[in-house]
Amino acid sequence: MATTTHSTIRFAPYNVGRWLLWGFTALVFILAPVVFSGGFAITLLSQMGIMIIFALSYNMIFGQGGMLSFGHAVFSGLGAYFAIHALNWVGDGRLWVPVTLIPLVGGLFGAVFGVIFGYLITKKAGTTFAMITLGIGEMVFAASLMFPGFFGGEGGISSNRVVGEPFFGITYGPTIQVYYLIAAWCFVCMIAMFAFSQTPLGRISNAVRDNPERAEFIGYNTQRVRFLVVVVSAFFAGISGGLAAINFEIVTAENVSALRSGGVLLATFIGGSMVFFGPVIGSIIFIFFAVALSEYTNAWQFYLGVFFILMVMYAPGGVASLVLMNLRVVQHKLFGRLLRPYVGVLLASALMLVGLIMLVEMSYHMTLNFAAGARMSLFGIEFEANRWSAWAVALLVTLAGAAAFDWQRRRFSREWGDVQALIETGGQRARV
Amino acid sequence: MEFFVISMLNGLSYGLLLFMLASGLTLIFSLMGVLNFAHASFYMLGAYFAYQISTWIGYWPALLIAPLLVGVLGAVIERYGLRRVHKWGHVPELLFTFGLAFIIVELVQIIWGRAAVPYQVPSELQGSLFTVFSTTFPTYRAFMMLVAVLMLAAIWLVLTRTRIGLVIQASLTHPDTVEALGHNVPRVFMLTFGGGCALAGLAGVIGGNAFVTEPSMAALVGVIIFVVVVVGGMGSLAGAFVASLLIGLIQTFAIGIDWSPVTSLQNLGLAVGPDTPMYSVLSLKLSQVAPVLPYLLMVLILIFRPRGLMGKRET
């Protein structure tokens, strides 16, 4: 009996790959700022690291525990507030904590609030859980504006991260040092959270997600399991909050807002909640939208929302599942058959995307920037946004793209279905 | 006394408005198991549609057309969006409506801009209905209550006295049997979703000009109606009714009261000043705490009665 349980937990063939994978991840963390060395790239990378911890901690309860939370920013935000107060106390000399360990302060207080709120929210599961987390999130947000002493009111609490004695010359003044601090914490947290998913608690939380009734039958208190998972997840969320406090040197009420909670949900889901590394992909995409794309367009939230809805409708497993499914096709050496349909679909959707972007950008320009004049530029072309000709072109491109997409999509899904069927039957033959 | 009567009336009208939203949400939830996260967005759309229509052809046609438009939009979204997601279970459905709420806010900002729009109460309904001592009660508030009550009576009649209402009620508990009897249950879903959205739209039409029509109105009301549904008990219409009135009254009364624990302590002759421990908590006035009270109520209900006021015990 003992040997059977042993063999299910330790899945030997994957371990070599796992070492390679983690080694590669560490390498990516180390080399990323060398490859992308601009100032903007470093801030982007830092924010990605913070988001990765946040999204992975969220996925602990969402993907692995099956609890849809709309209030996860409560834990990261309150962690961030305590971290920034700790940072200020270090600056005053009232407290001695190295800046490197400040995120741990955030994590501890995140866990404390995980205990307090986790007790309340895990009283229910399913849809009610989602609504309660939403309510708790709003409550904390409303309360944050009520106690200006601690939360700093509208302006938030600001701080200075260059405090304490330099440690081997590290002062955390330059952003590159902060990036490596974030990268180190991110790497450690990733390993810790992966390890957690392999522990008995992590495993039983999967069971509670899949079938709470049977989990109770084998003697687990599902409410207790969910509570413990929320506390652990809140701890990691608090660490990400602490890192955010160090990175931005300011914490405002926005850190506990529903916007932040919704953002982490979007990131996690887009990346793929059923695979451990899914939220990592999702965080990178999300930060790209939120930080990089928002430099170029006001409509980034619209694009993100549409992207999210399309993922929910057509790829509920997220980007990670798309990657895995295509890898499977590649493994069976059938990708060649999909290549042509892929090119067709991508070209058609690119055309449609261009048309849609034109429509959206022109609409935004008309309502939000019109005071600055009708002239706008898009894809390097300058034109007047209030001419009917511009709208006609945009509409035509969109419709042509949509028609082409529909045509190509049919071919693609036929081919895709064939290939999947081939893999399924081939897999059976191989197993026999 | 004056404060009491006016707050009571205002609280009731606000509570009835909340119930117009919560009733649609509850119906959709108990029929389809979908928590419509975008429900408050349909409320917002109702207000914006009514604003747009009233600038073209006046308020009274808008009162009829805007909810219908919102209802049709809701039905279309159910048919071509939600139904596709249905096969993947309730969480993707909830996420779909979450994304929808996200997009609707953005669309509203694209079309009507980020600032509030001047959606006015029609001139027939401006002015005050009666005066209690020295405070006046606006006619429009009374009109809101009237519309809400009429609407509630209409839903009740439709649900209990018409054929389609009976089919809806039967689909709530025995969808398979209803389907076996030859009714098109997916179409019932679509109609209910559209109907619920239309109710939200109607609430928007009459709420939008009583309060402010702006892109953040969905988020402001959205969370409160979720709290209403949790407090009332998931899927219970009667519970939602009691909870919306309760929350409407609590919020309206709290906003008008300037009491804080410090004033009472000082009246008792205790010296309470900024140096007293917990002063920042004790000195909060009830009117300042008002936004948090619904959530506190929810927390208390969860601790002492987790199934809600009138909800069924969860198995």
Image (cartoon, coloured by chain):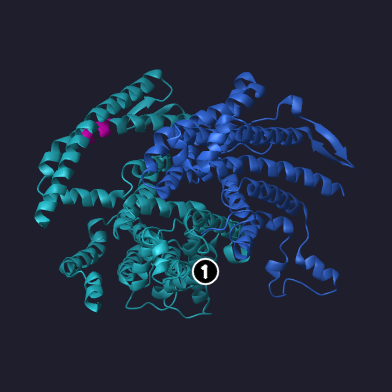
Q: Nearer the viewer, residue B142 or A77?
A: B142
Q: Colour of chain B?
A: blue
Quick check: is B116 in the magenta stretch? Answer: no
Q: Is residue A261 left or right of residue B147?
A: left
Please, which chain is the residue tagged with disc 1 on? A
Q: Is residue A197 left or right of residue B263?
A: left
Q: Is residue B177 above or below residue A3?
A: above
Give the image location of residue B86, x and y in percent: 40, 42
Span shown in magenta? A345-351
Q: Is residue A271 above or below residue B87?
A: below
Q: Amino acid at mark 1?
A: Phe
Give the image location of residue A271, x and y in percent: 32, 52
- What kind of element bears circle 1? helix
Q: Residue at x 28, y 28 (%)?
A: A401
Q: Main secondary structure of the magenta part?
A: helix
Q: Is residue B76 left or right of residue A2?
A: right
Is residue B107 visible to the viewer in this orientation of the structure? no
Q: Quadrant of residue A62?
A: bottom left
Q: Which chain is cyan?
A: A
Quick check: is A350 in the magenta stretch? Answer: yes
Q: Is residue A227 above or below residue B8?
A: below
Q: Nearer the viewer, residue B266 or B275?
A: B266
